[in-house]
Every structure is written in C-alpha cells, then in structure tokens.
Image: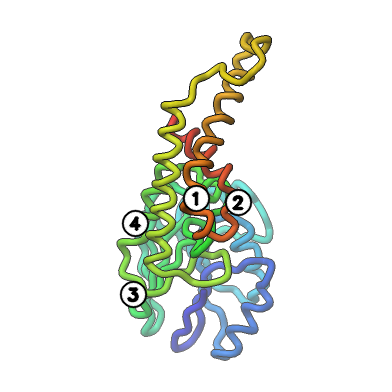
Amino acid sequence: MFLVYETGVVMVDAPPRYSAQLLKAIAEVTDQPVTHVIYSHSHIDHIGGVLDLGGSPITIAHDETKRLLARAADPKRPVPTVTFGDTYSLKVGSQVLELSYHGVAHEPGNIFIYAPEQKTLMVVDVVFPGWMPWRRFALAQDVPGYFQQVADIDKVPFETFVGGHVNRVGTHQDVRDQLEFMNDVKAAALTSLQTTAPEKEMDPADFANPWAVFDNYIDRVVVQCVNAVTPKWQPRLAAFDVYIWDQCYAMEQSLRID
C-alpha cells in the first residue's frame, strides 16, 4: 500500500517478489520519490524488497520489529530509523497514517496501519479475505492474541482492508466471517478434546510409549475437529481443504497449553 502526499510517497511494506512493480505502480500516479517506508512487521516476504525502492527513505516500525531485524542482520531488511512503542502518528503534508501496536499475534511488532481520511486499514498476516488463513492461524506466535486482533480489526471504522495476501482487499464482513470460522474451530476443538479418549484405536504394545499415546490422541482430536467444521466452511473459504488440519491442530494445542 502507498500513500501520496504533496512532496513524496509513503510506502507500506515492499515484498521482494514484486518490488519492481511497486515502483511502476507509483509512477502511474505520481513522479514524487518514496520518502518513507513503514514496516508492517519483520518478515522478509513483506519487507525484503525495501532496498529496491531506491533513495534513502525514512523507515518506521515498532520497537519489536527493530529488535528482530537487528537479530536477523539481513542486509535486505535494514533496521528501521524510527521506532515506536504503542502508537505513532505519521503526518506528511496533508496526509496522516495512524500506526498502533496491539500485542503479539502473528509475531511481535506486527502493527495496524490506518489511513483515517481514506478509511483504509492495513494489518498483515492476520485476516485473509475470502480464504482459509495460512496454516496454523498464519503461524501465529500467540493464538489467543491472534483471536483478539481479528476482533480488534473489526472495531476499526475502515471501508477497505488490506491484508497483505490473497487476491483482493477486504471488508468488515470478511473479518467477521474469519472470526466466526475461528470460533467454530475453537468450539469444535474444545469438544473434541473433551470427548476423545486416550489409548483408543492403537496397538496396546505402544501404551508404554507416552509420545505414541499422545500422538494418537492428538490426531484423533484433530480429525474430529476437522469433521465438525467441514460441512459449514468448506463451501465458504477458498483453499479450506489445504489448511483445515493445521488450524484444528493449532487450536487444540493452544487450548491445552495456553
């Protein structure tokens, strides 16, 4: 996503797979240079093309993103020059972007980027409009935090949602659909955990191996969860079949240990 102001362009993320196309897109709108780059978070698939934008833009990110990039020491992902803790208002010319941190979900440092005048919200790797989320709730490092962030996204008065993946922007209905799906997975996984008995459908010779007993139990919990949510959601989410096992697995793990 990019925002044009009187004397420049603010770029949000620069995925390496199409960083050259980003410059072409900007050139179709303005001949102004990129003066600021906001990192949504530290992952290379979203900011690994920042150097391809050229110039010496001011880079802005959360404190945690700076920490992770300093640890990574990746020359393709420069450490940000400006960081913040909870909120940051970027005012350039007549344009404003409101940056805010809502805790750990996908990874530490992943931020909300909101353009209030344009009523556009960008949050990357959390909501996937019309699609099954990437595996294990988009590799969420904090599953309860991930659930909370999807609910928080719906509270923002946006009209256009930019999620960083899949083939279209999103709406509030997309956010609500994903949250409904996630809550259905949570309910199904909880029921499965409560109604699936250990040490069933396995060779008694393996009973002395606790890893084998638990692996068998987890697999049967996940199967029951998958079977419970498939009739409702398979027709509604693209690529449902690819990652539904991963979602149920991540959910039962989180319910047991988080």
What amino acid type should be assigned to the residue bearing mark 1?
Answer: Pro
x, y percent for residue 257: 45, 29
| Residue 87 in view in this figure | yes
What amino acid type should be assigned to the residue bearing mark 4?
Answer: Asp
Question: Is residue 158 rendered to the left or right of residue 247?
Answer: left
Q: Is residue 202 above or below residue 252?
A: above
Q: Which residue is mark 4?
A: 152
The numbered mark, 2 or 1, whose residue comes first in the sequence reads: 1
Kindly report which numbered mark, 4 or 3, lies closer to the viewer in this rendering.
4
Q: Which residue is mark 1?
A: 231
**Residue 241 has which mark?**
2
What amino acid type should be assigned to the residue bearing mark 3?
Answer: Pro
Contact (CB < 8 A) between labels 2 and 1?
no
Question: Which residue shows up at 39% across the image and 84% down it?
Answer: 93
Contact (CB < 8 A) between labels 2 and 4?
no
Kindly report which numbered mark, 1 or 3, lies closer to the viewer in this rendering.
1
x, y percent for residue 17: 69, 67
| Residue 81 in view in this figure | no
Between residue 34 and residue 180, name the one nearer to us.
180
Q: Which residue is mark 3?
A: 116
Question: Which residue shows up at 58% across the image and 42% down it?
Answer: 245
Quadrant of the rendered structure where residue 84 is?
bottom left
Image quarter where the C terminus lies is top left
